[in-house]
Image (cartoon, grey):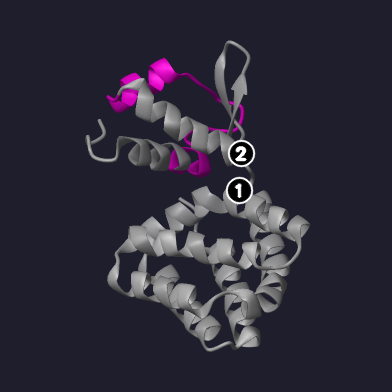
């Protein structure tokens, strides 16, 4: 049974872990009633967790039959991060001169003083800044969609080994604050490569 604190977030993480880890294999049917009973929570936080997973492509609704797991294969996950590693570093090069340094410094301060949850929130904000300032609405849409599709894997990696992604983000923010686009782009590509090769739950 889950703790009462942050029920939606706990349900989201547990469901994502079970889908990515194969406990809920591709094609498995899920129902709100069964999950609410198993987790010992009401349907309200559970529905929010399921909405997030649906938006991220891990589950899909079935007409009048609940939900179905759409678990990507390890090869598909690798392709997802490979795609990001090819696209986003170039967007960073183009976006960096447009990103206010004050916003980057604020993110750096937040990640320095916060815990794992704040580190993940800073990561989200940093990638959004890159997308929003890239100067091309279509690339922005692509980058934000890839960010959304990557969310479950980023969350689990951050929970499993929080110090590694945190140190990567600090180094990347330092390069961005310094205006060193090439170093920042290389660090970002490396960040994606590490995420791609981390052991999955």
- Residue 167 in sight here: no
* Left or right, residue 145 beside residue 111: right
Q: Give me the residue at 53% from left, 85% from top.
A: 175
* Location of mark 1 (residue): 149
In x, y percent, where is residue 112?
33, 75
Alpha-carbon neighbours of circle 1 within 10 Å: few (<14), some, or many (≥20)? some
Would you say the residues marked 1 and 2 are in contact, meaning their CB atoms lie under 8 Å apart?
Answer: yes
Q: Give me the residue at 31% from left, 27% from top.
A: 39
Alpha-carbon neighbours of circle 2 within 10 Å: few (<14), some, or many (≥20)? some
In x, y percent, where is residue 24?
50, 32
Range drawn in magenta? 17-41
In x, y percent, where is residue 187?
57, 79
Rounded to the nearest angstrom, the CA distance separating label 1 from label 2 is 7 Å
Query: Above or below — where is 154 with respect to 179?
Result: above
Q: Secondary structure at mark 1?
A: helix
Residue 113 picture quarter: bottom left
160, 101: nearer the viewer: 101
View extreme (top): residue: 64
* Location of mark 2 (residue): 57
- Residue 20 is one of the magenta-drawn residues: yes
* Left or right, residue 74 beside residue 163: right
27, 123: nearer the viewer: 123
In x, y percent, where is residue 102?
46, 77
Q: Give me the residue at 63% from left, 62% from top.
A: 132
């Amino acid at each position: 049974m889950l703790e009462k604190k942050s029920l939606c977030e706990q349900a989201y993480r547990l469901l994502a872990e079970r889908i990515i880890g194969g406990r809920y294999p591709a094609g498995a049917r899920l129902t709100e009633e069964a999950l609410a009973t198993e987790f010992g929570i009401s349907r309200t936080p559970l529905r929010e967790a399921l909405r997030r997973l649906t938006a991220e492509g891990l589950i899909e609704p079935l007409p009048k039959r609940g939900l179905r797991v759409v678990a990507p294969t390890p090869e598909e996950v690798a392709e997802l991060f490979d795609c990001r590693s090819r696209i986003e570093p170039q967007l960073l090069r183009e976006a960096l001169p447009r990103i206010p340094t004050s916003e980057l410094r604020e993110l750096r301060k937040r990640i320095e003083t916060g815990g794992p949850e704040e580190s993940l929130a800073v990561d989200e904000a940093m990638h959004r800044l890159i997308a929003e300032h890239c100067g091309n609405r279509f690339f922005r849409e692509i980058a934000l969609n890839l960010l959304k599709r990557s969310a479950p894997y980023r969350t689990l990696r951050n929970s499993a080994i929080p110090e590694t992604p945190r140190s990567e983000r600090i180094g990347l923010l330092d390069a961005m604050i310094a205006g060193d686009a090439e170093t920042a782009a290389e660090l970002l590509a490396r960040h994606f490569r590490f995420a791609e090769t981390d052991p999955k739950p």
